[in-house]
Structure formats: C-alpha cells, structure tokens
Image (cartoon, helix red, strand yellow):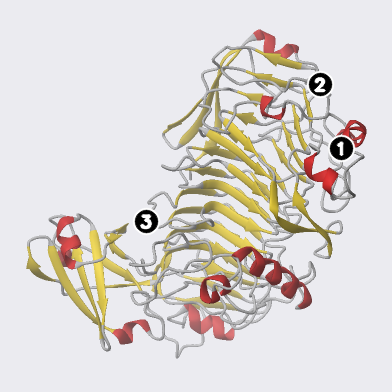
Amino acid sequence: MNHEYHISMNGSDENIGSVEFPFRTISKAAETAKYNDIITVHEGTYREWINPKFGGRDNIRRIIYRAAAGEKVVLKGSEIIGNWDLLKENIWKAEVSNALFGNYNPYAQELNGDWLLSPKEPYLHSGMIYLNEKALKEVFSVSEVANTAHSWYAEVNEKQTVFYANFANQNPNECTIEANVRKCCFYPEKSVINYITIQGFEIAHAASPWAPPTAEQFAMLGTHGGKGWIIEDNVMHDARCSAVSLGIDPPESNKSTLYRDKSGYQYQIETVFKAKSMGWDKGKVGSHIVRNNTIYNCGQNGIVGHMGSAFSEIYGNHIYYIGNAEEFMGWEIAGIKFHAAIDTYIHDNYIHDCGRFGIWLDWQTQGVRVSKNILCRNGGSQKFNDLFVEVSHGPYLVDNNIFASERNLQIVSQGGAYVHNLLAGAIHPSPCMDRATPYHFNHTTDIAGYAFVYGNDVRFYQNIFAGTGEEIHDWKIGTAVYNGNSVSMEEYIDNLDKSMGDHEKYYVAKQPVYIDRNCYFGNSAAFDREENKLVMNTNVGLQITEEDDKVYLELDIPEEFFSVPTTMITTDNLQPPRIVDLPYEHPDGTPLRLDFDLFGNRRADSPTVGPIESLQPGHNKILIWQIK
C-alpha cells in the first residue's frame, strides 16, 4: 500500500487526509489518490459527484474507495430542499436558485434518446423528488399535482427552479425532502480511468439520463470506458435511469434521435466499427467485476453496458424494482442490459420484479454464460420476461438457472444452449431477417463477419419445464414450438433447396435444433422428435416464496422424474453454432463440463434434470437465496 486517505464529515479539505486530520470530501481524495492508494470514508452522508482523476496501474495496483468497516457511508446525488410554502390544499411550493445545479439542471433536462418510447410532448425529466426516501411521481402541471398524491412538477426559469409537490397530507417542513441535482455520484468525466474498486457504500439519488448503446451511458456509478473496476458490497437505489454503467464512450450520442436520417440499428452498427477502430479491445476495456451489490428502484437498469461490459463477471447481486414504476418505456429497460458482452459471466444473481426484462443480452452475445441465477416476477404490466437474447449468434450458454416468471425466454437469436434450467412459463423463439449483426473471432473483439438471425440453432438439454404459465399468441410452454425442425447439420444440409440461389436457400431452410432429455409437466409440451424425455400433466406446484429474508423454491417431484436417462453435458456434446462455428468453452479456451448445480454441488455422471442435484421425490422446499 502506498498511502491511505481518510474522509470524515468533521474533516476539512485543507487537511492532509490522515486519520487524525481527514479530508471533508471524497472528491478531494479523488484528485490526489494514485495507484496502490486506499480512500477510507467514515460515517455520514456525502452529497457530491466523485470524478476520479487517476486510476490504478493493473489488477493488483489499483485505487480502492471503501466505506470504513462497520460504518454507514451514504453517497447521494441529491440535496435537501426546505422552506416549503403551502399554496392551497395538497399543493406545496419551494424555490431554489439554479446555482444549485451547476451546468446540469435535471429539471430542464428531458429524458430523450434512441429507443426511448416516450410521446413527443410532454417529456419527463431526469430530476426526481423524494419524500423520506420515497420517490414521487413527475406530472406535467400544477393542476395535476393537486389531483395526484405523491407527485411533483417543476418550472425552470432563468434564475430559479420552482417545485410544486403533493405530499399526501404530510407537512414537508417536518419531513426530509430531497431533489436529485447531480447526473452521477461516482463517474470519471475523463474516459479510460482503470482499476478502481468501490466497496461498501450506499449510493442513491442520481439524475442519470437515458442510456442507450448509441450514447455515453451515464449512470449513478459508471466506469466510462475504463478497465478492471471492482464494484462490490454496495447498496444502490433510486437512480432516475441506470445505477451502474459499464459502457464505453462513443464518438457521438443519440444520432438517430437527433438527426432522424438513419435508424438506431444503423447507427449502432457504426458505433461498433468506430469503437473497434478507436481501440475497443480486451487489453484496454471491460474485465470488470460487479459482485454482491443490492440494486433497486431505478427507472431503466440495475446494470447497463455497451461493449464495456465485455470479459466481465457479474455475480451475487440482488436486483429488483427496475423499471417497475413504468413512468417511461423503451427498448433498453432491464435488470441487466448488455450489448456485446463478449465472454461475460453472469451468475448467482437474484433478479425479480423488473418492469420489462430480468436480463437482456443484445447484439454480440458470444461466449456469454448465464448461470445459477434466480429470476421471478419479471415482465411488468406488458408481460415481458426473465431473459431476452436478441440478434446474436452465439455460442452462448444458459445453465442451472431458475426462471419462474410467467414468461421465461425470448430468443431472437441463434447459437444458444439451455442446459439444466427450471422454467416455469413460456418461451418465444423467432428469427430476425432485417438486422444483420456482427460476430467475432474466438474470445476477442475482432469482427469475423455479420449475419441475420435465421432462428432455431438452439440446444435444450436436461431442463425442467414446469408448465405453470399461460400460452398467449406466439408464447409457448415447452419445446413443441420447434416441431418441424431438422435435428442435425447433415439433415439441414440435405433439406436445402438446391434449385435456389447461393444465399436464398438459407433464408427459407429451418436451422436444426438439438433437444433431448428434458422433463415436461403441467401444460408444457415436448419437441416431437425428442428421443429421451418425460411428459406428464402433473402440476409440480412451483412457487417462489419469501420468509424472513429467506427465499425458497417449492416443488413437488413425482417418482417418474428420476427415470429420464441423462448424461454429463460437456463441450463435446454441444454442437457448435452454424454461423459462428465455434465451440462452447470457457473464455480461456478450456472445455466446458457442467458438473456443478445451482448451489455448487457436484453432479453425478448421470445428473439430475434441472438446476438442483439434490431434488427428492415428493414435496421439496429449498432455500435458494438469503436477502442481506
């Protein structure tokens, strides 16, 4: 260790930063600390944007920001708003100087950008008001405030921002009223600041803007194109849009929305190629660890990242209430939303009650593994789902997860392998023949080609389909949705229409599927060419319950369940995807062997179907998560 700086609410930035003479602000230490330094923050609420000037040199010689052991340290992007006047029943008014906001006034900043599905007018804003830590709803006039409990409206003039709020019969001058005033809480304005650790904080109330992949993805806490960050053991909540960003810095932002001359898809293609020409490479970006955090009450994402999330590990996180308020909608809302997360490992997370998707992997989902996660009650009022994999070509692996929402998998991709999962509800596979997306040379960001998503080319082995959901439109329960497909590459090639042109014949031929040794219960249905399977109309009584901060899986298992012949799933029995033609393997190139279950218990050579090796006949009640 080179140096340890201390920060205290009783300190002064004129001090030297020692334990006896601490700094007052974390920002002061962030201007000073260099590699191998530790910044220890003592108890209190710090209202500032930490903009680190320096990073570490490598994974060993990093800069560590940490909350002092046993002390509650809160970092907020908000300020307390006092001196409220009662105008009339239910309408309170407060005025603040615009100097409070510096060069970014969230109440003048409209939420807008690529893929945000808001009406043209009125727009929501990136600001928020909180009553005793509870976010109020933004409305668009003083009259709406009068008629809407727990709401707010702001008017910005040249010198002041005027707030109107309905506190539902509470006197705000006897409560804590906070307004988020800063875009970020911890985010380097300079890109490519590397090897920083952030540990043990509560972080809240950022006025973070909409964060699509075609823009700089600001968030409450973000890496801004850096490499090798560790974000661990934090509690993060109430970001207007995203809590954590692992994004890189594109040359320009929201060009489709700004110019309207090309689609967001086209600009995203350009963003990928521009980023590659500017150094998007495993040696320079990504490789982050985000672990053991609690993230909740955010409008867009718990964790977001475009290209900067590559080669990372995301685990042990509890993510919930993301986008569930549904104040605004758009095609970037999920508990975790990654683009181009090459070789990223997402495992052992509990993700629930998200308003659109639990996990959404979009573009270049290559080498990704989604393993041992618990997802439930995701989808919101519009009935979205637990896991969405979009316009990707694989290989990617989804294993040993519990998917317990009404809708589980939306697969607008090819090259996926789904092994040893428990699925309660419906799945929806589909091709995408109007958006070609890139794929890569193995375990690199180097682009090997690009292709349409022809659909199918999927593997389902040794999963439990509980059949407790409802089939609606193209959402089906089980694997019968793949009926009519070939079951080998040889059969696929033989079925190609030789009278058609070089590429036309591939548009109409259905890619093969590889489906075997699954169990189907309730109203789930099996693929008609699956050789080894169990199909029963038994209701297995699947439930996810919470008792005293413990989360349980309840499941009724019949004796017949254990009769299905199974095998150890390895690289050797997972057919490589047709387009990419690469093996399913670890990021270091070693073969896969799926010999551990959801809890890390070793599997037998003839393993149990589903994610839990220790299932027993009859009623099972199994502890699957401990809430911190």
- Sequence-wise, the earlier of marks 3 and 2 is 3
Say which of 348 and 111 sits in front: 111
User: Is residue 269 shown to the viewer in this render?
Assistant: yes
| Residue pointed to by mark 1 | 575
Q: x, y (%) of residue 228?
A: 70, 67
**Neighbours of disc 1 within 10 Å: few (<14), some (14-19), many (20+):** many
- Categorize mark 2 by other alpha carbons within 10 Å: few (<14), some (14-19), many (20+): few
Closest to the camera, between mark 3 and mark 2, is: 3
Q: Which residue is mark 2?
A: 606
Which residue is more in the foreground, 49 or 114? Answer: 114
The amino acid beneath tag 2 is Ser
Residue drawn at 64 percent across, 75 percent down:
250
Of residues 328 and 593, the one drawn nearer to the viewer in this rendering: 328
Residue extending farthest to the top is: 559
Q: Horizontal placement of 555 versus 265: left or right?
A: left
What kind of residue is marked 3? Glu
Quick check: 162 left or right of 436? left
Disc 3 designates what residue?
327
Q: Quadrant of residue 81?
A: bottom left
* Nearer the observer, 248 or 318: 248
